[in-house]
Amino acid sequence: MTMRSLLQITSMAGAALLLAACNSTSVRVGGAPEASVKNCVAAAARELRVPAGSIAVDSGSTPRDGVYAINLKVGPQGRSAVCTTDENSAVLGVVYKRSE
């Protein structure tokens, strides 16, 4: 087994683990409903053009009543992004955070 194939297997296993964690029914972040978390991961994958398995849910908060902000880590570099949803778990937006 070459180093490249070992790396591919390892990264696929990591992506599968992240995907399983995002699909878990016990995922709650910062008070956000689990549907909001799942919708954010799906929207981030679509909007940021990355595989859903490369997105990890980092943390979350409720900046206003009925609005949830969910922090994400995207890709192997762990680039920061934020996703907002409303009380019905509809995604309001997904953006990369500016590096400081």
Image (cartoon, rainbow, N blue to C red):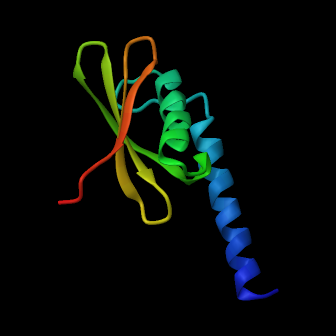
Q: How many labels does the image show?
A: 0
Quarter of the image where the C terminus is located: bottom left
With respect to residue 62, does 47 lie above or below? below
Q: Is residue 96 above or below residue 92?
A: below
The structure residue drawn at horizontal position 71% and vertical position 87%, both measured from the top left corner, is 3
- Report the residue at 54% width, 43% height from top: 45
Quarter holding the N terminus is bottom right
In the image, 82: left or right of 100?
A: right
* Rendered image quadrant of residue 8: bottom right
Q: Which residue lies furthest to the left in this view?
A: 100
Is 37 situated left or right of 93 in this image? right
Is residue 43 shown left or right of residue 18? Answer: left
In this rendering, would 45 be left or right of 30?
right
Percent x, y for residue 15? 63, 56
Relative vertical location of residue 90 with respect to residue 79 in this rendering, above or below: above
Residue 42 x/y as whole percent: 56, 35
Q: Residue at x 74, y 70 (%)?
A: 9
Residue projecting furthest to the bottom: 2
Please identify the residue farthest to the right as the structure is shown. 1
Q: Which residue is drawn at 63% across and 35% down?
A: 23
Residue 22, x across and y down, in percent: 57, 39
Up/down of 60 relative to 56, above or below:
above
**x then y, percent, for residue 5:** 76, 79
Q: Which of 89 and 44 is in front in this view?
A: 44
